[in-house]
């Protein structure tokens, strides 16, 4: 860790979420963490955002808060845009005026899913749902703010804590005999803890550049500032993800009778929000810039199942 990060102040939003919770633990060695709860910092209140940022005066703002309920967002677009677009814009404006670095997370759902190969950062976006549109608006507002920023687009986030697909599958597999899971949407599960580790690595890397070049954080970030795809390596479908989760759990718990899993089509499982068929993201830019190679999703799933079994 570069010397300049001693007592570096880091503001984390979304502290109770999957990524936020992992960030609080992972970024703690880098400096002083402030992660206000929702009752202290409600991101729909822009005056409160500005006040809290100015009072704490962070060197880094890490925005892990979001409206992540993809189907619910269809019926509450104003709220989704307030949290996913307006709040990141205000945070980025504050970061810019303080000379702080901003880290933000976006989603594979900014794409329409018609590409046959993994999406790269420069591919045209085309969200199919309100959540994706609101997250895209957030990305664009940060990019336009003039702040030094890193936006990590990720997908299918899960971990040992929080509301996520793995924990839902384990609960449902214990309650039911048979599960029917969508098998024609392709993507990559991503471990929340790895996103936090990546964030710590990117912050440390940038701080080191600033220290070595005797320049400001913003100057050091200029060549790095931008969008990065950051998802688990490999690919699967929701059905493949469910099957791997349940078979991995069955190995650990042979005494349990867990549900069988059948693949169904998207048409057989109608949802309020439309989802992309292909949401695979190419993470080569992340590897080339930060030397960070995301773990294979099956390896991280093994780690999470081990944690849940401990
Ligand atoms: N989850 C995924 O599969 C996924 C996929 C792609 C990208 N991402 C992105 O990854 C990032 C982290 O996602 P996650 O999975 O960690 O999400 P999460 O578990 O749903 O956590 C989101 C956090 O945001 C907080 N929040 C919601 N509304 C807020 C408000 N008005 N003011 C302040 N905080 C508020 C939530 O608080 P409460 O819990 O109290 O509501 C929660 O702590 C987000 O940017 C998300 O868009 C996630």
Image (cartoon, rainbow, N blue to C red):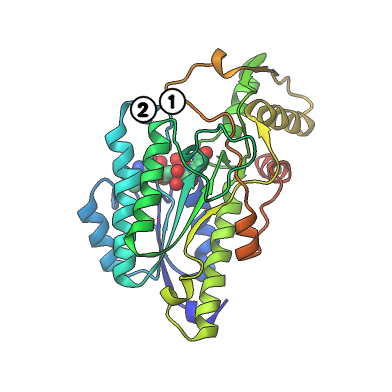
| Residue that protrudes farthest toward the left in the picture | 47
Image height of 295 relative to 244, above or below: below
Numbered tag placed on residue 273 in the rendering: 1
Residue at the spot 63% in from the left edge and 42% down from the top edge? 118
Question: Could you tell me which secondary element the residue under label 1 belongs to?
Answer: loop
Res. 307 visible in picture:
yes
Please report whichever mark, 2 or 1, sits nearer to the chain's N-terminal start: 2
Label 1, residues with CA under 10 Å away: few <14, some 14-19, many ≥20: some
Q: Image quadrant for the C terminus?
A: top right
Image height of 132 relative to 85, above or below: above
Residues 205 and 281: in front is 281
Q: Disc 2 designates what residue?
A: 74
Res. 36 visible in picture:
no
Residue at the spot 34% in from the left edge and 52% down from the top edge? 141
Label 2, residues with CA under 10 Å away: few <14, some 14-19, many ≥20: some
Q: Image quadrant for the N terminus?
A: bottom right
Question: Could you tell me which secondary element the residue under label 2 belongs to?
Answer: helix
Number of numbered tags placed on the structure image: 2
Q: Measure the alpha-carbon separation of dots 2 and 1.
A: 6 Å
User: Residue 84 appears at what percent x and percent y?
Assistant: 36, 44
Residues at marks 2 and 1 touching, judged by CB atoms closer than 8 Å: yes
For ligand 1, which image quadrant applies?
Answer: top left
Residue at the spot 58% in from the left edge and 43% down from the top edge? 119
Image height of 203 relative to 114, above or below: below
């Amino acid at each position: 860790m570069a010397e300049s990060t001693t007592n570096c102040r880091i503001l984390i939003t979304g502290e109770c979420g999957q990524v936020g919770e992992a960030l609080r633990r992972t970024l703690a060695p880098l400096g002083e963490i402030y992660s206000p709860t929702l009752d202290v910092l409600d991101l729909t209140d822009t005056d409160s955002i500005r006040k809290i940022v100015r009072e704490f005066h962070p060197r880094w703002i890490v925005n892990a808060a979001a409206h992540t309920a993809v189907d619910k967002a269809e019926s509450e677009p104003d709220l989704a845009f307030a949290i996913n677009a307006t709040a990141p814009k205000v945070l980025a404006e504050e970061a810019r005026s303080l000379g702080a670095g901003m880290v933000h997370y976006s989603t594979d759902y900014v794409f329409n899913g018609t590409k046959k190969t993994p999406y790269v950062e420069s591919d045209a976006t085309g969200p199919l749902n309100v959540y994706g549109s609101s997250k895209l608006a957030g990305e664009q507002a940060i990019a336009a703010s003039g702040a030094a920023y890193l936006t990590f687009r990720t997908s299918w986030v899960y971990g040992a804590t929080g509301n996520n697909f793995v924990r839902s599958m384990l609960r449902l597999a214990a309650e039911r005999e048979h599960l029917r899971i969508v098998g024609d949407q392709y993507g990559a599960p991503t471990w929340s803890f790895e996103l936090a580790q990546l964030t710590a690595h990117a912050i440390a890397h940038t701080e080191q550049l600033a220290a070595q070049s005797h320049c400001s954080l913003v100057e050091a970030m200029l060549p790095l500032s931008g969008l990065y795809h950051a998802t688990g390596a490999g690919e699967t479908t929701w059905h493949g993800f469910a099957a791997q989760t349940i078979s991995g759990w069955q190995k650990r718990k042979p005494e349990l009778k867990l549900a069988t899993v059948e693949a169904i089509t998207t048409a057989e499982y109608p949802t309020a929000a439309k989802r992309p068929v292909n949401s695979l993201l190419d993470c080569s830019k992340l590897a080339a810039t930060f030397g960070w190679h995301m773990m294979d999703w099956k390896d991280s799933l093994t780690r999470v199942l081990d944690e849940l079994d401990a």
